[in-house]
Image (spheres, rainbow, N blue to C red):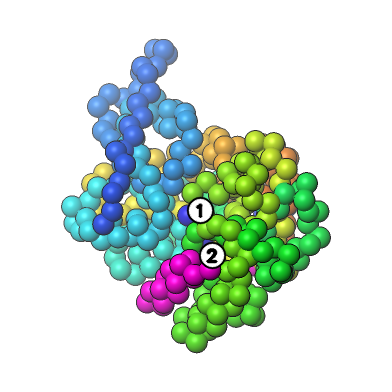
Amino acid sequence: MKKLAGLLAAGVASFALTACNEEKPKTTEAAPAAESKAAPANAGTVHLYTWTEYVPEGLLDEFTKETGIKVEVSSLESNETMYAKLKLQGKDGGYDVIAPSNYFVSKMAKEGMLAELDHAQLPVIKELNQDWLNKPYDLGNKYSLPQLLGAPGIAFNTNDYNGTEFTSWGDLWKPEFANKVQLLDDAREVFNIALLKLGKNPNTRDPEEIKAAYEELKKLRPNVLSFTSDNPANSFISGEVSVGQLWNGSVRIAKKEQAPINMVFPKEGPVLWVDTLAIPANAKNKENAHKLINYLLGAKASEKLTLAIGYPTSNVEALKVLPKEITEDPAIYPTAEVLKSSQWQDEVGDAIELYEKYYQELKASK
């Protein structure tokens, strides 16, 4: 599952705000169409490697019905795992479409791991929010197209808090939250809040600043009840936690389950990420890969996906028909003001090893 927010905010505001084990791939294949015009036969298979929740039931049925192309889906656990698997595959390939977050797009493109997109095969580009395109992590969208926007904030149980208690990431350090706080199980997400609290760049590669953030997080550790990124909304739905770090899409999931939850974005702003769709350089079926990307980013599929998981979609046509309970909920669709104060998460090169080292030490401590 990740300081161009001013441009992004303008586009969003204009639309009413505006080595690793892998589970066996799941194959989708639609039943034969009842219409006289049958789907193309023997159109092949495309292998999709994406986040588990990004393929809700039925999402791919129409694609298979229309194209005759089967889709084998593998669950993506983290950007780091995806990167490692593709490195191990080498030239052999295995996936046709992947879903890296923006900061891994830049890393993978630099290392020659991504194929250049053929925009002529992707007419859906005209439906995408233009303020989500042509960002420094992928100028000209040479290698990727944006799908969903993520923004972490401070979530809280509305039966226990009214939200005014949380104006800064630093509020999570308050003594009254001892052993109550849930954090996302992600080194960068956790270090982001400490770096922002200290007034530092969340994308820093400076070892001294990273160490300072670690020391600050050690002070937070007594307040931390759990670290989780595997369906993090569940702990709020069950009532196990009442305050913590959460993604905007997770808030939508919890609200769909009638959980008493809301979320605010601290004054320092969230560190934004965009999950994208891209084609590995070693993909075996690039033609079908383009077709699948075009479908997944289209209005119908984008509407279904945001309805299911809540994350803001890049497709402006889908945005027009999504219910206001999603598009006008500032905990799910951050306001233009929030986006303007935000930063983008970026890759940090070899410094990621230092982040991970300190993060594992943090989790092991108490």
Front-most of residues 253 and 238: 238
Q: Which residues are magenta?
A: 342-366
Q: How far across and down, in percent of the image, does residue 168 sit?
A: 72, 69
Classify residue 295 as left or right of residue 334: left
Q: Residues within 10 Å of mark 1 (few under 14, many from 20)?
A: some
Q: Residue at x 48, y 42 (%)?
A: 54
Residue 326 appears in view: yes
Q: Residue at x 60, y 37 (%)?
A: 307
Classify residue 336 as left or right of residue 30: right
Residue 137 appears in view: no
Q: How many marks?
A: 2
Q: Amino acid at mark 2?
A: Glu
Classify residue 92 as left or right of residue 219: left
Front-most of residues 148 and 321: 148
Q: Residue at x 56, y 75 (%)?
A: 218
Q: How far across and down, in percent of the image, does residue 254 sit?
A: 64, 42
Q: Amino acid at mark 1?
A: Ser
Q: Residue at x 72, y 49 (%)?
A: 157
In the rendered view, tell whether residue 175 sits above or below residue 158: below
For label 2, the residue is 189
Marked residue nearer the N-terminal end (1 or 2): 2
For label 1, the residue is 229
Mark 1 vs 2: CB contact within 8 A: yes
